[in-house]
């Protein structure tokens, strides 16, 4: 058992190394946009979901599940090598696709999704089979499924947190991207070989596989365990749990981006903390599964507590950051990282300790349905992963754009609350007066939390304390990639500027006298006869407008954040000399590197409008 736990820990570690390095490479290829990241992540999760479903159904027929697990890991290592073949192939194919379909945003996203599926699906499909197959090996008796699988699940997630930490901070720096990737492939192959060798030391033939398929607990025990929740209801709860959890991860990452520097490392920190708390939650759920607590009551409690604690995360974050102040930016790097880890734990740990317990408790409730371990785990994991993929897409494509950051978090809280009320109703229906006191207290807590959120002060969208002059926020634009604010110093109408994610000043109207003037015009003055110019980054648009007086044929601008373009058009047009109406100008909400790689057009001058420093602020 110990050897199996170690192998599955390492498996979780390598899985996150693959995922982070895949995200990095496909982000470079498809463009470093929030939508491209969401598409890549969703493709990976869909592979996991289908793999969990297929391998879960197949696992109950396995005579040697540990050997099959080893073969799956070997298959993962082989499929992962496609990384070195498919990326060059994409590089040959992508310019053609971009040239023909980039004008149709949704269709082009669908093509990116298809490309990501070709690349990620084989390995993701196999990785999705590791949990149900290994679960079938360690828990042949369905009655022991939740106790053993919850530990296996916790160990795998803990390994994933180590993999995220290694891939985010150490491996690429020490070995480089390719060698780090090959190291992960080698470790995966070694795990597979060890599992195959271990499977030969004893006869693991499962003569009771067919009996396990038909095993049914007594009616009284089934009622006590499940509270009359059927396999369909449990599947829906598992899917909703995945949806809510991944949507919150996307939203919380977006929340932390308002106050943190160096997005690559801070993103990794948040993912690591997220995974550590999910592992801790699985251990907590395991202790409850072994106790005499009713599983349906525990599930209701954690769903309810997660809703309440999630509702307060924006207020806790606002308080700990003193109203979205740029967090600890004066600290040296070695001191900054522990501070960020501490902030992430304080904000996310309480709700995640509750929310991460939900899936293991669903497995406990599913024991009463009488299916084989591998099949049950595979089905529940598959729908959970489908929900996770949908949650990532919903948060990245819809919620942030339509509701904004804070309202999106409250919306997820509302969904959690609705599920909690449903479970309370089921508790009352099954256990009657014995559940009345618990249900009354729970419902009162939900109502109190809702009233607190409604009556609380409006949370800030941008912090204004870093500039001494009195100023007001003219407008804010929230999207999946960033929050963009247009700020004006009171009494000085000509002095307005743009801030992104509460951290980066993107220039202002008074820049036209010096910085933006030079950035937009000096490179063109140095060229003898410029005809086509490319601007990497738009900012306020003032630098680009400085190119308008020159006898240019085309002016192409790419800006990664669409909200920057909208803010510029609405609030900076008086300073742009007709930039948005000039027929020579083509402004694209696109990743600049991606565009330059794909386009066949050549440019006489390329200007990176990215490096100004305003009032000592980090750029």
Image (cartoon, grey):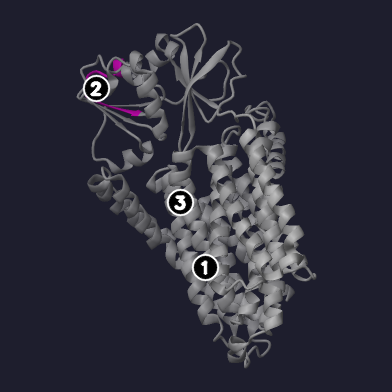
Q: Which residue is mark 2?
A: 581
Callout 1 secondary element: helix
| Mark toward the start of the polypeptide (1 vs 2) | 1
Q: Which residue is mark 3?
A: 393
**Does 27 appear above or below 123?**
above
- Name the residue: 71% across, 75% down: 224
**Does 91 appear above or below 208?**
above
Of the 4 image quadrants, the one containing the N terminus is bottom right
In the image, 432 versus 555, the foreground residue is 432
Callout 3 secondary element: helix
- Name the residue furthest front: 433
The residue segment tinted magenta is: 524-535
Q: Are marks 1 and 2 in contact (CB under 8 Å)?
A: no
> How far apart, in angstroms, are the residues tagged by discs 2 and 3?
34 Å
Callout 2 secondary element: helix
**Residue 180 appears at what percent x and percent y?**
55, 55
**Residue 533 appears at what percent x and percent y?**
28, 26
| Mark toward the start of the polypeptide (2 vs 3) | 3
- Is residue 69 visible in the rendered image? The answer is no
- Name the residue: 61% across, 91% down: 211
**Residue 264 appears at what percent x and percent y?**
55, 41
| Residue 345, magenta (yes or no) | no
Q: Dot 1, crowdedness within 10 Å: few (<14), some or many (≥20)?
A: many
In the image, 217 versus 565, the foreground residue is 217
| Residue 531, magenta (yes or no) | yes
> How far apart, in angstroms, are the residues tagged by discs 1 and 2?
50 Å
Residue 577 relative to residue 150: left or right: left
Q: Which circle marks residue 382 in the picture?
A: 1
In the image, 430 versus 80, the foreground residue is 430
- Name the residue furthest top: 491
**Residue 147 appears at what percent x and percent y?**
72, 72
Q: Which circle marks residue 563 in the picture?
A: none
């Amino acid at each position: 058992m110990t050897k199996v736990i170690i192998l599955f820990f390492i498996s979780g570690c390598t899985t996150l190394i693959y995922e982070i390095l895949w995200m990095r490479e496909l982000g470079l290829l498809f463009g470093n946009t929030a939508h491209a990241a969401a598409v890549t992540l969703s493709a990976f999760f869909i592979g996991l979901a289908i793999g969990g479903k297929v391998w879960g159904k197949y696992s109950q027929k396995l005579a040697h599940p540990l050997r099959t697990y080893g073969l799956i890991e070997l298959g993962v290592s082989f499929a992962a090598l496609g990384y070195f073949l498919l990326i060059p192939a994409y590089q040959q194919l992508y310019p053609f696709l971009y040239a023909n379909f980039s004008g149709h945003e949704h269709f082009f996203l669908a093509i990116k999704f298809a490309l990501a599926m070709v690349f990620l699906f084989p390995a993701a499909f196999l990785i999705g089979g590791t949990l149900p197959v290994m679960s079938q090996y360690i828990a042949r008796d369905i009655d022991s499924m939740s106790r053993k699988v919850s530990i296996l699940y916790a160990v795998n997630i803990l390994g994933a947190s180590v993999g995220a930490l290694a891939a985010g901070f150490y491996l690429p720096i020490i070995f480089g991207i390719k060698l780090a990737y090959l190291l992960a492939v080698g470790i995966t192959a070694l795990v597979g070989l060890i599992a195959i060798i271990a499977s030969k030391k004893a006869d693991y033939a499962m003569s009771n596989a067919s009996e396990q398929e038909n095993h049914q607990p007594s009616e009284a025990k089934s009622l006590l365990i499940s509270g009359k929740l059927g396999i369909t209801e449990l599947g829906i709860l598992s899917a909703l749990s995945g949806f809510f959890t991944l949507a919150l991860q996307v939203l919380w990452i977006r929340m932390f981006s308002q106050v943190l520097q160096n997005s690559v490392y801070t993103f990794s920190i948040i993912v690591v903390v997220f995974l550590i708390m999910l592992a801790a939650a699985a251990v907590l759920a395991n202790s409850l599964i072994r106790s005499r607590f009713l599983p349906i009551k525990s599930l209701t409690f954690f769903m309810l507590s997660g809703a309440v604690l999630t509702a307060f995360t924006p207020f806790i974050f606002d308080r700990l950051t003193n109203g979205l102040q740029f967090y600890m930016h004066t600290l040296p790097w070695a001191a900054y990282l522990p501070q960020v880890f501490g902030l992430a734990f304080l904000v996310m740990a309480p709700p995640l300790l509750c929310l991460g317990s939900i899936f293991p408790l669903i497995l406990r409730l599913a024991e009463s349905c009488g299916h084989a371990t591998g099949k049950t785990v595979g089905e529940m994991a598959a729908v959970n992963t489908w929900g996770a993929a949908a949650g990532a897409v919903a948060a990245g494509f819809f919620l942030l754009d339509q509701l904004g950051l804070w309202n999106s978090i409250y919306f997820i809280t509302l969904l959690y609350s609705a599920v909690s009320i449903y479970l309370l109703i089921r508790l009352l229906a099954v256990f009657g007066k014995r559940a009345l006191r618990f249900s009354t207290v729970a419902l009162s807590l939900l109502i109190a939390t809702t009233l607190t959120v409604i009556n609380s002060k409006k949370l800030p969208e941008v912090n204004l304390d870093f500039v001494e002059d009195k100023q007001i926020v003219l407008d804010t634009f929230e999207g999946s990639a960033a929050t963009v604010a247009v700020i004006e110093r009171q009494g000085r109408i000509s002095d307005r500027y743009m801030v992104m994610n509460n951290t980066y000043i993107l220039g202002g109207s008074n820049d036209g006298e010096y910085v933006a003037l030079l950035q937009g015009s000096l490179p063109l003055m140095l060229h003898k006869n410029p005809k086509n110019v490319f601007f990497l980054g738009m900012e306020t648009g003032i630098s680009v407008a400085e190119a308008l007086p020159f006898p240019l044929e085309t002016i192409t601008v790419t800006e990664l954040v669409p909200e920057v373009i909208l803010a510029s058009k609405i609030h900076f047009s008086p300073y742009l000399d007709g930039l948005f109406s000039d027929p020579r100008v083509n402004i694209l909400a696109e990743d600049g590197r991606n565009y330059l790689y794909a386009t066949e057009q050549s440019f006489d001058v390329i200007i990176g409008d990215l490096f100004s420093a305003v009032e000592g602020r980090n750029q």
